[in-house]
Amino acid sequence: MNLSISPKVKKALEEKRPVVALESTIISHGMPYPKNYQTALEVEEIVRENGATPATIAIIGGTIKVGLSAEEIDYLAKTPGVYKVSRRDLPFIVATGKDGATTVSGTMIVAAMAGIKVFATGGIGGVHIEGENTMDISADLTELGQTNVAVVCAGVKSILDIGRTLEYLETLGVPVITYKSSEFPAFFSSKSGYSSPLTTDKIEDIAQTIKTKYHLGLKGGVVIANPIPEEFDFDGEIIGKAIREALSECKEKNITGKEVTPFLLQKIVDITGGKSLESNIALVKNNAKLAAQIAKLL
Amino acid sequence: MNLSISPKVKKALEEKRPVVALESTIISHGMPYPKNYQTALEVEEIVRENGATPATIAIIGGTIKVGLSAEEIDYLAKTPGVYKVSRRDLPFIVATGKDGATTVSGTMIVAAMAGIKVFATGGIGGVHIEGENTMDISADLTELGQTNVAVVCAGVKSILDIGRTLEYLETLGVPVITYKSSEFPAFFSSKSGYSSPLTTDKIEDIAQTIKTKYHLGLKGGVVIANPIPEEFDFDGEIIGKAIREALSECKEKNITGKEVTPFLLQKIVDITGGKSLESNIALVKNNAKLAAQIAKLL
Amino acid sequence: MNLSISPKVKKALEEKRPVVALESTIISHGMPYPKNYQTALEVEEIVRENGATPATIAIIGGTIKVGLSAEEIDYLAKTPGVYKVSRRDLPFIVATGKDGATTVSGTMIVAAMAGIKVFATGGIGGVHIEGENTMDISADLTELGQTNVAVVCAGVKSILDIGRTLEYLETLGVPVITYKSSEFPAFFSSKSGYSSPLTTDKIEDIAQTIKTKYHLGLKGGVVIANPIPEEFDFDGEIIGKAIREALSECKEKNITGKEVTPFLLQKIVDITGGKSLESNIALVKNNAKLAAQIAKLL
Ligand SMILES: [Mn+2]
Ligand SMILES: [Mn+2]
Ligand SMILES: [Mn+2]
């Protein structure tokens, strides 16, 4: 197997101590250098502070790595041209000896291979805006339907179609549990206007659900939605309104297909007054903490 | 395992005698009390009369039950707030010790766990009206694509999109066999205007298909469509026309999303002159009988 | 098991020599007699010339055959009423003892049962034109998401929606590698206007990707897109334009649903000046050759 687990992660897994998987797309494609490098290390530290071992996942020179050194994180953070690796890309990138940063889908696959049950990220992929027409739907959803890893997130990535993503997850039979809210969160905002299919205030319920699921042999993941911390919570109405306006603007200016996402992301940066990076980091850390707390109960 | 199989069902399975699974959503959410209680017992009796052991499935206090006592059926029939349990809900409801009535999806999962191969219900879930836009598609279809249980039904639930549901089942590779008709039935009517992908007049062919499928290791269910008995058969054209008119009315009155289904269901009650409950019971019994006949040949 | 592997194929598999699966829908439903018979034999010969054993797959009298005799191919080529067998049809056709020609989906299933890793065809199924509305999406895509067989093709069948098919394959996590082009081909044309998700000039990379995928336990197929040979390459713009015009014509003439495909296929015959059959044969042979070359490296 082209799978290399770091000594610390291997030891934690062997001793059945809690481990939290972390993705690398956020390092290679999510933030500017050196903010991405610093954040990756800080997120790992939060996992440790909360009693679990972090396992950042990536592919380096065709080897699937579970648990990266600071040097490896630095390499991914500043090297251009690192592939974004989802399920479809994984065997080719490994076979051809390339570097790859794993998406939610790719990270779930590798976490499951390594025996890691919980994974923290910012937001999962979903149905794109107009995805009911374009069929642009993230492979993350397919992965959640089949791979046994619980994913702690602040909802779906900021400019996706939340309602249709929830429908899609229901069709695939994926449990969606929002922690401490009956409303499914909207990444930069704790409010989305959509009820959460399941909700609980107790971390024990979440851990017990994950254990029961695996115990019953029900394949697939669990989405743990963790609303953004209050001090970073943007008014969902303002963001929602801005996105709707930006979508109208797309139609007027005939911005379509793959150009819509970067256009909307820039709008988010504009309306948050540039605070979106800071908020993104805050919610990832918040998720890493919850993931570690869940991992300890598994 | 939080799985409790009743002594009668356990004995039948051990002695390799025919068993038919039955769902509980129809008890908790499908009919008024005490009609739901009486019907559940009558359906079980029909299974017995036709030579098989009934196994009604539900979750009580977090325990998955296969084979309910009359007391347990009565409890589900009159207790408010019992959860509807599909694949996504199952581990949470079990983990948190709640009561749950299983949908087609939930019942298939539990039947497969218990080793039961045939399940009788009224209608399966499917693509909702406008589901190509809303992406509201029942998890029952996903389950049929992956879980090895044959489901005897009178078609899809009455107000779903039959054509798109058949397309979706084809995409997932699910065999759809209509018994004694080349036309796929429409729940309250034996006519839908859609050809059945497969058809046979022989119960032996159905049983042999199920056995061959499992023998070949082809995962997933089989839909056995059993048209409503002739004496209860509503004119499909009248129902179809009424649904189309009701849909126009929805658009006029701006009734959308989750409000459409109850609106259409009420229309069905209106146009059938209130006979829809009686017809619903008749078709479930008809399906229970065919399911028992199939189970005996497996 | 109702599975009969011919002595030559069985011997090749036992000796771990390369084998290439071939489908039979192209024989029964793809070409007129005796062109279909001759082509099937010629394609088998090309597989042999390139160092692999051909295994044409079909169902005859309810027996699943892997490796057909010339007599069996002749029988399928000239017998009317042979079923087209996809995943959903397979158990019924076997159980009832009928004849069936396997589609891409059906052939993948049987190839996987027999332990064959590579399969050559003309084009795979996909999302139909207007499939985002009709939900008419080929079961071939589902199969590619779950069954471990690499499929060498010249793209998707000529009149499908290429862009949405690529989105669907991405969602399912299926690797799509175009050989010697960064553009995904369009069956009769090497150009489609869509970038290929993955590309390589080396057969070794393709083989290594397939081996890595199975080694990592990642279920599902691999699409190897092999552009039509240059001397048969139609101008993609001309074909694309003709299809768009034909689609407008469909709307004007109110041609909808199942009538659209034969209408478009006839248009293809018209605009290619009747050369489409010849081109179809050329690309299938081209794919058989590449499949054999890949199979030798596995
Ligand atoms: Mn996409
Ligand atoms: Mn739904
Ligand atoms: Mn179709």
Image (tube, coloured by chain):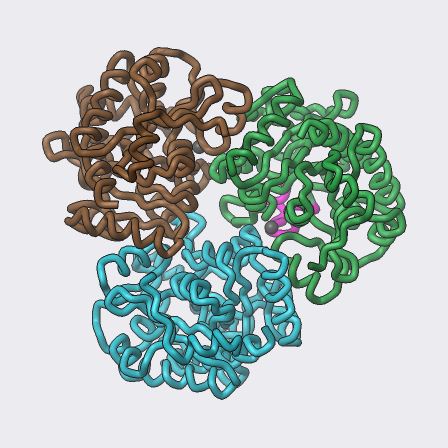
Chain colours: A green, B brown, C cyan
Give the residue furthest to the left. B231
- Across and down, in percent, residue B25 comes to 36, 24
Q: Is residue A249 magenta?
A: yes
Judge left or right: residue B56 versus residue B188. Answer: right
Res. A81 image quadrant:
bottom right
The residue under the point 14% across, 30% down is B232
Q: Does A124 sit above or below residue B91? A: below
Figure quadrant, ligand 2? top left
Number of marks present in the image shown: 0
Q: Is residue B99 left or right of residue A82?
A: left
Can residue B180 be found in the magenta stretch?
Answer: no
Magenta: main secondary structure:
helix
Residue C152's spot in the image, x, y percent? 51, 71
Q: Which quadrant does the N terminus of chain C fall into?
A: bottom left
At x 38% / y 27%, what residue is drawn? B5
Over which residues does the magenta segment extend? A246-262
**In the rendered image, is residue A43 in sight?**
yes
| The image quarter in which residue A269 lies | top right
Q: Would residue A51 appear left or right of C273 to someone viewing this image?
A: right
Closest to the observer, B115 or A173 = B115
Of residues C117 and A17, which is closer to you in this image? A17
- Counting from the top left corner in percent of width and height, residue C43 is at 42, 82
Asked if one can make out residue A192 in the rendered structure from this viewpoint, the answer is no
Q: Quadrant of the C terminus of chain C?
A: bottom right
Residue at the limit of the structure toward the bottom, as seen here: C49
Query: In the rendering, at what x and y percent does residue B33 appear?
Result: 28, 12
Q: Compared with residue C242, is residue B236 higher up or lower down, i.e. above or below?
A: above
The structure residue drawn at horizontal position 35% and vertical position 16%, both measured from the top left corner, is B72
